[in-house]
Image: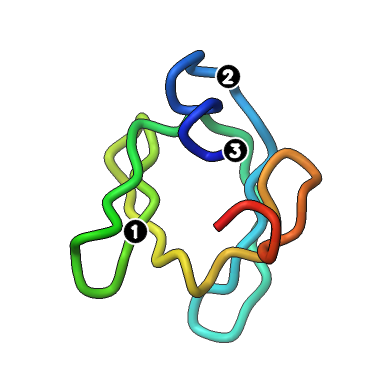
Amino acid sequence: MLEELALIKKRCEIVFFDEGERITIIESIGGIYQMSEPPVLQLQSGKEIALEKLISVDGITNESVC
């Protein structure tokens, strides 16, 4: 799912926790780096979000996207 969104560069709603706060942004996925520690989702802007902090991507909950 995440790989597909990254390939087509679709802007999507990304919901995640950052320092205990729930954040919602609309942005394209630049890449998924599962070999890094912790594994991260990199956005087109360069921002990185740890996969463990994702709540949902494009309306799909974390259990389904990771």
- Between label 3 and label 1, give the one nearer the viewer: 3
Instruction: Kindly identify the residue that appears in the image at 72 percent across and 38 percent down.
Output: 58
- Badge 1 crowding class, 10 Å Cα cut-off, few under 14, some 14 to 19, many 20 or more, is many
Residue type at numbered disc 1: Val
Instruction: Please identify the quadrant where the C terminus is shown.
Output: bottom right
In the structure shown, which secondary structural element does the residue marked by tag 1 occupy? strand
C-alpha span from label 3 to label 1: 15 Å
Where does label 3 land, which residue? 1
The reply to whether the C-beta atoms of the residues labelled 3 and 1 are less than 8 Å apart is: no
Residue at the image point whose x is 40% and y is 59% from the top: 49
Q: Which residue appears farthest toward the right when viewing the image?
A: 59
Does residue 65 sit above or below 19 in this rendering?
Answer: above
Tell me residue 55's x, y (percent).
68, 65
x, y percentage for residue 39?
A: 31, 65
Which of the numbered marks, if any, corresponds to residue 10?
2
Classify residue 17 by image quadrant. Answer: bottom right
Q: Hey, which residue is sitting farthest top in the picture? A: 8
Element class at badge 3? loop
Q: Specify the amino acid type for callout 2.
A: Lys
Q: Residue placed at 55% from the left, 27% from the top? A: 5
Q: Which residue is mark 1?
A: 40
Characterize the local packing of mark 3: few (<14), some (14-19) or many (20 or more) Cα atoms within 10 angstroms: few
Q: CA distance from mark 1 to mark 2?
A: 18 Å
Q: Secondary structure at mark 2?
A: loop
Could you say which is closer to the camera, residue 35 or residue 13? 35
